[in-house]
Amino acid sequence: MTRSIIAAAIVILTVGAPSRADDRADYDRAVKPLLVKHCVACHGAEKPKGGVRFDGPAPDLTDPKVSEKWLLARRMLAQGEMPPEGKPRPTADELLATMTWIEDAAARAAVVTRGGVGRRALRRLTNREYVATLHDLLGLSFPHATGDLGTRLPSDAVANTFSNDSNSQVTQALLLRRSLDLAEDLLAVALPAEGTVKPFRYDVDLRSLVAEKHRAFLAIPEANRKGQRGPAIGNVVVPAHEKGSQPAKLGFQHLHNQPLAIDHLDPAKGLMLEPNPLTTGRRNVIMLTLPFVPDGGVLRVRVRAAAVMEHDNSPPVLRLSIGGSYGEPGDLVYPLAAVTVTATAVKEYVLEVPVLLADGDWKSFRRQKQLLVQIDNAAAPLGPTPTPENYDQKKRDTYLKRNRLLLESFSLELAAAPTWPPKSEVVLLAPRDGEDDEARAKRALRAFLSRAFRRPVADRELEAFVKLYRDQRAAGRGFLDGYKTAVAAALVSPQVLYLIETRGAERRPLSAWELASRLSYLAWNTTPDAELLACAADGSILTDAELTKQLRRLLADERAFGFTREFTRQWLDLDVIDHLAPPVTRPARTIDDPSELAWYDKAIRRDLAAEPAHVLLDALRNDRPVNSLVAADHVVVNDRLARYYGVALPTGAGWRRVAAPENRRGGLLTQAGCVAAATHAQERGEIKRGVYLVERFLGIDIPSPPGNVDIKPLDVQLAEDKSLRALTARQHLDKHRTIATCAVCHQRIDPLGFVWDGFDMYGQPKRDKQGKLVAFDSSGTLPDKATFANFSEFRKLMAQGELESRFAVAFSQRLYTYVLGRSLDHGDEVHLKTIRTTAAKDGGGARALLLAMVLSEPFRNK
């Protein structure tokens, strides 16, 4: 064995690892008693069954054969297959101690075989990180686009961990193919080939059009108006701005497919649109039908608009959508971009989306040889509207108090490139006097690759991409095509797709470039910006002071929301909210309009899933105590969620921090989104809720139920077994703990299942059919046997002990896993203890905790 390998082995066995003596002591205490009592009689020295013995010393699970034997033993214990039928059964505590030791020993062994404590595998960018990286490298920005380009890539979700966990990531061939497709489409937007996009523009002066129609209406003798209260606007031909281009057709559609009524037309201001809840069928919309379908370019609409704020409801939302011919089956439209309009004075709003990145049934559009562009008001209601007595569907507008969108004029155009970045210099440098094509390509590639690789590019690396450009030119392709081929190859290269951190046998500090990348992808989910790269170039990022300064700067930027969104979304399993079957609001509580209900339902689900990210971002930026995440007396809400909680908000837009009502004083623990994600839309969701609290808030992993157990939700059990209906909910759950193999987990899960007993499946106070609050009992027991009589006591127990509280310890473990981009191993607990101690001295805030993690040795070493 060489000296370096010996040194590496010493590091592996000593740095942060428990000694073999400690390991043997734990084995003798936790495992050996069960083996002697239940296993050695059949698996001892004399005639061991199956040749398997359990009478030896503590096993070494780095040996694959030994590991396989012990993991099989753990599975058989969990499933109740061992000891065999007819033999005495171990208690739940004995099973728990033995199974936990085997799990920990296997995890420690995996660390050693992976290369040592505190080391991570090669980390790939997540889908969202890759999409953001492409946009930043190519200088693209479409802030109002509603589509998620990450869905074009294969799902990167990983069970029971984060998508950035390098030890669990996989890379499929399909991912490389889809990544290349996406990179090429974005390149076509950033560097459009000359002559490939035929620009057009259609200008519509709605104020003049309305005034003209109004004058024509007034000229009609009153006796001939046939009961009409005002002018109707039918189809209008709109000439193209460019000579020789075909005209478009302008159309309007109001409620129940009726022409726009007089109260939507103001000859002095323009046209006013009520909100439109539909993406199938149309009402309250403006439609411009193009006589052709563009193949590329950027679809842009410039609208002069204002908010007509007449009611206590959400401000209007200007939305751009596309669709096929009016009257086609399904009449489906595809939203592309949207912006909230809060100004009551008319101003210009610009929405733009690249055609190549727009969702839609493009095959059908091209078959029809026309494209319908729709503008409407997409403001979802802030809350369900109570049904009036003697409800009359024909007078529906009377009951729906919505704020309208005033449109003065708009311009629809197709351009070769966006109005804001990219500047061509971001991707392709301008030519110099006397410089030939290859010299320009080489100079441009050096600049681009240095940004793409997040470090200076080596000459040998550069030459490989220059050769690719050269080969393309030799094959007869033009300068731009050859250059874009080289750039596309770079965008799917390992240097871009992965955070490459070259490592040796021994741990060493990250380079300045590697550290800048780690920090940027942590706080922003994207590539380092110019300031971070400058700090890497001069080495200042390696100092505590500069690293601290940069983390604070990144957290203050709006892009930091991407960090808190991704962390909370995966930690708290918030994606499930969007897929729960029952509606958040039951039809009986609102106007009987399915489209209105679905509209509100989608919006409130989105807000429920976003709330934890906003709360965490507020805690980080203001360095609020970590325990405030489960013991806060405030909420961070927008208008819609405030109404859901019954909170009064000051006038304004966006998410704001306000005092919480009594039943929401528990931070994440009283957020409706967490309750909904935990309950999984089950009327009897106590077990689901217990598992959620144990895993997400206490950091205790609960294994999947044994394969030989028939698992049925409590709702199904009640439906199938009438005898269970005579039991109380607590008596029903007690049955899980009568079998030792079930009690191993259920003695930790079930006592927490009633913490949220006062909330329904969507986190609202639980009520009976008459709308009255029902009595509830939130008492229970924590896994460490601490008891609580109500939710208030539970919350205090969770937050007791500053940064060593039950919640703070579990939260720090989850956060550190995300920060490091790998699953934690047994060597990390020592670092986490130091991190919490350091953060406590700095005030115990969320930002102090994150900063201590960023300054820690595992984050700054490889």
Image: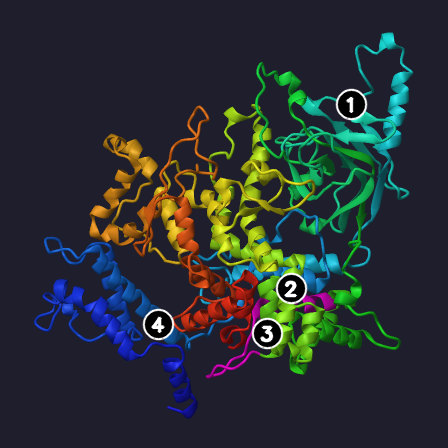
- The N terminus sits in image quarter: bottom left
Query: x and y percent of residue 260 in the render?
Result: 76, 24
**Can residue 436 be found in the magenta stretch?**
no
Residue assigned mark 2: 554
How packed is label 2: few (under 14 Cα within 10 Å), some, or many (20 or more)? some
Distance CA(mark 3)–CA(mark 1): 60 Å
SS for dot 4:
helix
From the viewer's perspective, is the residue at label 2 or at label 1 nearer? 2
Residue assigned mark 4: 108
Question: Is there any visible trace of residue 165 in the rendered image?
Answer: no
Image: 766 above or below 180: above
Residue 784, by quadrant, is bottom left
* Magenta highlight range: 482-510
Question: Is there any visible trace of residue 816 in the rendered image?
Answer: yes
From the viewer's perspective, is the residue at label 2 or at label 4 nearer? 2
Mark 2 or mark 4: whose residue is earlier in sequence:
4
Distance CA(mark 2)–CA(mark 3): 14 Å
Distance CA(mark 4)–CA(mark 1): 72 Å
How packed is label 3: few (under 14 Cα within 10 Å), some, or many (20 or more)? many
Residue assigned mark 1: 263
Residue 720, by quadrant, is top left
